[in-house]
Structure formats: structure tokens, C-alpha cells
């Protein structure tokens, strides 16, 4: 159902893009699972720094359209499966005209090579301390340089065993001063400095934050970790149902710009958008009714009216300090298992 809804959405051809690119943020997170013998065996048991005893954890990874708020691909897997492995699996759903946005844990010659083989571009933040070219750029005082990167020993060995030609990748390194004095270096395959000037990249990379926001919606608005069952199958069903609800909410919201403009035409201070938190709650409430045999068009019209009646202003340039708080736990004794 997710795949069908995503394909239908992109067949419309009126999606938001950045300079002609569909922006795909790839990032991962972790979720707590019910602790049972089945989940321990399937997902694994781990210790944490802020809880007594052990917990069952799984890894989540997404390829997420940050402008249209669509989960292109989402996986819930064993925590031992690495983010690079999952990122490479997401690439099967990307194609020419996409631009990958990656956090600083992802940069590697192998991943960049695989992205470029799909005719996809990338932009990623670098851990400056791990990249000599990034250190040299910061020390030089220059804004950017173009340089080649080559694989390390292990990747070179793997390529040799698999008879893969080893060719350097030409990349563009961009230095940005962040508010508060923090230094940021981005690496990108967008080499045309006239078409993609330096000043575009600070805003471009900031758009990656929408992936983080999507995880916040999953965990707090949709209560992703509040699973309806304790079996592995129930957990996987709940996870993909949440992804479906998020996608349907985004797809329905994307078609309401005209209605929103008509409703808020008196406002000149802010642009308005659907209150996504309220919309998610309404879709969660209405989704089972789509399978009840009732008139689907009536249900959709009711949902859309609810969306248009619950708007929030878009306030640009706001930022908040990130607080890493202990996650809320859910009382399982009230679940109808």
C-alpha cells in the first residue's frame, strides 16, 4: 500500500523540488521494542547508559523526501545492521534527478560511488577531524575547493576481489561558518559553481533536518514505540502502518495549497500550512474506515475539511536547542493483547 501510494503521488508530476532535484534525506534512528523472548531473539538485547537492566532495540532507516514529506523507503531491522548497509538498500528507490542529503556519519567512498552509479547526486556533512582535505580547507580560509577522493585500503581490497575498477571521485568541498562559531564542511557532487553557487548550500543542507523532524513525528505524534502487540509480526505491521499514515497525510496535505490560500488570504504576515500533528491524528482515526465499505470519497472530503480547518503559520528562521531527554515509556498493561 505504501509503494502504491508513493508511485501514484509522483505520477502527478507537481511535487516540490530544489533546483529541479527531488531532495532525499537518508538517516537512521533507534526504537525501543517490547521485551519478549521472541523480540530478544529476533532483534537483540542491549544495555543502555540511562536504564537499569537490558532493553530490546531495533534500527530504523529512511529515505525521505524532505520537501514533500514522503517516506520513499523505510526499514525496521536488527540494530546490528549498519546505517551504510541500509543506505545502500534505499538506493534502489532513487533515480536520476534525485539529490541525497546525508549526515556526517555516512560519507564514504563506497557509498558515494554507489550513489553516482544510480545517476544521483549527493551532499553530505563531513566529520572534519576524519578528512584531511576538510581540515586543509578550514585552515586555508578558502570557501571551497574541488578535489578527488580515493578508496581506503579495505574498500580498495574489496574492489580488487570483485574486479571493480578503482577510479577517484571528483568532489566539491564547501566550508560554511555556522551561528555560534561552529565550522561545517560539506562534500557534494554538484561541481558546477556557476549553477550551484556557494551561498545555496547552507540552506540546502539545513533541509536535511526534515528527516529528524519525521522521526519526531513518528515517535511522539504517532507513538511509534507504543506497539499494539508484542510479537515480531505485530511490531513490523505497526511500523509500516505508521509509515503509511505519515505518507497519506503528506499526500492529502500537498493538494490543499489553493484551499489554504483562499482561507488565509487576509493574512499578509505569514504563509499557512496544514497542522501536521492534528492531520496525523485525523488520518489515524479515519484510516480503518477506509476498509469498512463506506464511501471513500465522503471520507476523503471529511478529512480535507478537517485539514483546512486546522492550519498553522509558517514562521521562518526559527531554531531551538536540541534536548536529548529520556524517552517516554508506555504502559503495556492497558493494551488489548
Image (cartoon, rainbow, N blue to C red):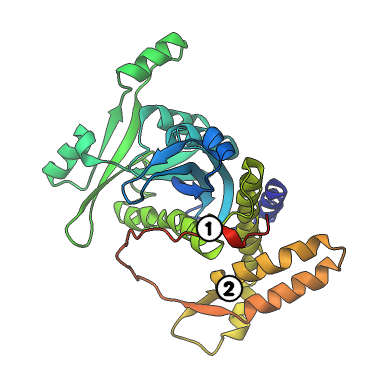
Q: Earlier in the sequence, mark 2 or mark 1?
A: 1
Identify the residue at image location x=68%, y=49%. 2
Q: Which residue is mark 2?
A: 278
Q: Which residue is more in the foreground, 60 or 48?
A: 48
Residue 269, given in percent of the width and then of the height, sits at 43, 85
Q: Which residue is more in the foreground, 44 or 53?
A: 53
Q: Evaluate whether residue 52 shows in this view.
A: yes
Figure label count: 2
Identify the residue at image location x=47%, y=34%. 115
Question: Left or right: where does residue 243 sit relative to residue 164?
Answer: right
Instruction: Name which quarter of the figure residue 156 lies in.
Output: top left
Residue 93, given in percent of the width and then of the height, sits at 59, 39
Q: Residue furthest bottom?
A: 266
Question: Left or right: where does residue 196 sit relative to residue 34?
Answer: left
Residue 329, given in percent of the width and then of the height, sits at 47, 59
Q: Which residue is more in the foreground, 198 or 188?
A: 188
Q: Which residue is mark 1?
A: 218
Circle 1: element type: helix
Amino acid at each position: 500500500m505504501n509503494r502504491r501510494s508513493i508511485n501514484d503521488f509522483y505520477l502527478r508530476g507537481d511535487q516540490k523540488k530544489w533546483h529541479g532535484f527531488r531532495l532525499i534525506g537518508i538517516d537512521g534512528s533507534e526504537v525501543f521494542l517490547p521485551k519478549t523472548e521472541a523480540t530478544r531473539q529476533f532483534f537483540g538485547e542491549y544495555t543502555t547508559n540511562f536504564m537499569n537492566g537490558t532493553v530490546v532495540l531495533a534500527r530504523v532507516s529512511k529515505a525521505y523526501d524532505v520537501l514533500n514529506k514522503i517516506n520513499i523507503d523505510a526499514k525496521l531491522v536488527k540494530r546490528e545492521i549498519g546505517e551504510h548497509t541500509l543506505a545502500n538498500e534505499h538506493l534502489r528507490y532513487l533515480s536520476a534527478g534525485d539529490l541525497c542529503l546525508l549526515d556526517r556519519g555516512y560519507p564514504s567512498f563506497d557509498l558515494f560511488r554507489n550513489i553516482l552509479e544510480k545517476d544521483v547526486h549527493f551532499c553530505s556533512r563531513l566529520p572534519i577531524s576524519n578528512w584531511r582535505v576538510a581540515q586543509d580547507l578550514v585552515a586555508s580560509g578558502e570557501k571551497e575547493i574541488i578535489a578527488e577522493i580515493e578508496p581506503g585500503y579495505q574498500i580498495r581490497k574489496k574492489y580488487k576481489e570483485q574486479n571493480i575498477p578503482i577510479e577517484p571521485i571528483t568532489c566539491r568541498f564547501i566550508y560554511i561558518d555556522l551561528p555560534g562559531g561552529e565550522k561545517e564542511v560539506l562534500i557534494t557532487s554538484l561541481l558546477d559553481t556557476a549553477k550551484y553557487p556557494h551561498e545555496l548550500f547552507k540552506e540546502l543542507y539545513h533541509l536535511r533536518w526534515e528527516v529528524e523532524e519525521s522521526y519526531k513525528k513518528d515517535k511522539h505524534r504517532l507513538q511509534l514505540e507504543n506497539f499494539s502487540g508484542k510479537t515480531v509480526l505485530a511490531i513490523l505491521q505497526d511500523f509500516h502502518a505508521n509509515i503509511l499514515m505519515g505518507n497519506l497525510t503528506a499526500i492529502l496535505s500537498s493538494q490543499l495549497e489553493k484551499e489554504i490560500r483562499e482561507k488565509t488570504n487576509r493574512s499578509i504576515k505569514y504563509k499557512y500550512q496544514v497542522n501536521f500533528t492534528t492531520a496525523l491524528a485525523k488520518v489515524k482515526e479515519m484510516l480503518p474506515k477506509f476498509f469498512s465499505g463506506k464511501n471513500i470519497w465522503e471520507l476523503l472530503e471529511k478529512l480535507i475539511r478537517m485539514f483546512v480547518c486546522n492550519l498553522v503559520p509558517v514562521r521562518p528562521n526559527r531554531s531551538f536547542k536540541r534536548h536529548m531527554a529520556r524517552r517516554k515509556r508506555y504502559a503495556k498493561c492497558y493494551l488489548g493483547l
